[in-house]
């Protein structure tokens, strides 16, 4: 998420410093520091401005920066730039509850050994500990989870703000996020989703002005199972649920796949309701679901066999 050098800029930076002053504090060359500041500014951690011919650097007003400063000042004996770099922040993001190494590895998308390496410096300092085979964060430092989440949020904001000014992040993780905007985003990392994406599966829906994108640097496409979860995040109403039923039925989506994704996107209860409805042909019908006759008529309109 952020490197040790980038976090060290925050820990070292005075209220307003020139590049040369910051270079002296970091014991680095001016050229290296200038390049480092450019990277840090692109990630939303600092702002730069000109004072005559001198380029000066200030912390940004992002909440993540404020939280980081609080920890650095309160625990000056802990080298936070060193212990929070690399995968550590991404692992901390998910330590809002005790988790086993395997669970953390699956959530972060890394090997179990990476989780151990990432948390080892924190464990050595009593920031995290193990209980019943699960990693737990010490109550005194539980704010680090919020810090990791704010750092991820800041990173995601800077990614989307490179393309649009007005947007809403509907769901996010350290590596991906679902965003709503009225503007077109032309980037391979932003995959079109929402109602517009249904056309990919032969289900042309009425598309409104709002556009929805999944930001992901690792995915080249969005599956039917993931699209269903996106729709439920966007709007978990009767109309959306009916369209998700069409998609699940027409694509014969694997239930384990969609349930795993539903857990990730926080829509597990809604997806379980949809699957139970389809399995029982409408006999188990939770709220915000059509009658089986209503669904059958809708399916017939789109040529989906039920």
Image (cartoon, helix red, strand yellow):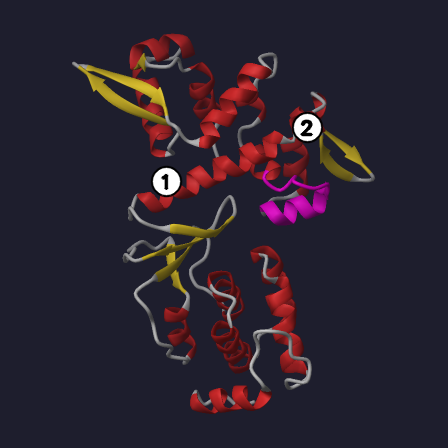
Is 131 positioned to the left or the right of 112 in the image? right
Residue 263 vs 96, above or below: the answer is below
Mark yes or no: residue 87 visible: no
On the image, numbered disc 1 is attached to which residue? Answer: 158
Rendered image: mark on residue 122: none
Q: Quadrant of residue 214?
A: bottom left
Q: Do the residues labelled 1 and 2 touch (CB within 8 Å)?
A: no
Residue 300 vs 46, above or below: the answer is below
Q: Label 1's element?
A: helix
Residue at x 62% of width, y 42% of height: 94
Is 237 positioned to the left or the right of 54 in the image? right
Answer few, some or many: residues within 10 Å of disc 1's Cα (few below 14, many 20 plus, some between 14 and 19).
Answer: some
Residue at x 68% of width, y 42% of height: 112
Mark yes or no: residue 299 visible: yes
Q: Give the residues in magenta.
A: 93-108
Residue 120 vs 77, above or below: the answer is below
Is 12 positioned to the left or the right of 109 in the image? left
Residue 57 percent coordinates (x, y): 32, 19
Residue 71 percent coordinates (x, y): 56, 21
On the image, numbered disc 2 is attached to which residue? Answer: 120
Q: Which of marks 1 and 2 is nearer the N terminus?
A: 2
Say which quadrant the C terminus sits in.
Answer: bottom right
Answer few, some or many: residues within 10 Å of disc 2's Cα (few below 14, many 20 plus, some between 14 and 19).
Answer: some
Residue 177 percent coordinates (x, y): 46, 51
How far apart in space, not on screen, are marks 1 and 2 (Cα)?
Answer: 30 Å
Residue 265 percent coordinates (x, y): 56, 57
Residue 226 vs 12, above or below: the answer is below
Residue at x 37% of width, y 79% of height: 204
| Closer to the camera in the image, 122 or 195 | 195
Residue at the limit of the structure toward the front, as seen here: 287
């Amino acid at each position: 998420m952020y490197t040790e050098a980038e976090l060290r800029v925050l820990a070292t930076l005075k209220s307003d410093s020139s590049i040369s002053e910051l270079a002296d504090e970091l014991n680095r060359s001016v050229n290296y520091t200038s390049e480092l500041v450019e990277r840090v500014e692109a990630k939303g951690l600092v702002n730069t401005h000109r004072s005559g011919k001198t380029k000066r650097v200030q912390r940004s007003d992002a909440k993540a920066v404020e939280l980081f400063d609080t920890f650095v000042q309160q625990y000056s004996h802990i080298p936070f730039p060193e212990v929070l770099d690399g995968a550590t922040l991404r692992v901390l993001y998910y330590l809002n509850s005790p988790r086993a190494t395997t669970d953390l590895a699956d959530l972060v998308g890394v090997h179990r050994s990476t989780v151990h390496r990432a948390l080892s410096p924190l464990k050595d300092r009593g920031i995290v500990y193990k209980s019943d085979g699960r990693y737990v964060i010490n109550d005194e430092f539980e704010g680090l989870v919020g810090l990791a989440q704010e750092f991820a949020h800041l990173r995601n904001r800077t990614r989307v703000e490179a393309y649009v000014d007005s947007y809403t992040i509907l769901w996010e993780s350290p590596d991906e996020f679902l965003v709503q905007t009225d503007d077109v985003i032309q980037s391979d990392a932003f995959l079109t989703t929402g109602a517009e994406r249904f056309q990919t599966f032969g289900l042309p829906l009425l598309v409104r002005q709002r556009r929805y994108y999944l930001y992901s640097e690792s995915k080249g496409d969005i599956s039917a199972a993931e699209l269903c979860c996106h729709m439920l995040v966007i709007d978990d109403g009767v109309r959306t649920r009916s369209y998700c039923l069409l998609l699940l039925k027409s694509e014969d989506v694997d239930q384990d796949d969609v349930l795993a994704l539903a857990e990730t996107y926080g829509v597990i209860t809604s997806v379980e309701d949809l699957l139970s409805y389809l399995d029982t042909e409408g006999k188990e019908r939770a709220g915000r679901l059509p009658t089986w006759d209503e669904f059958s008529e809708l399916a017939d309109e789109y040529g989906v066999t039920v």
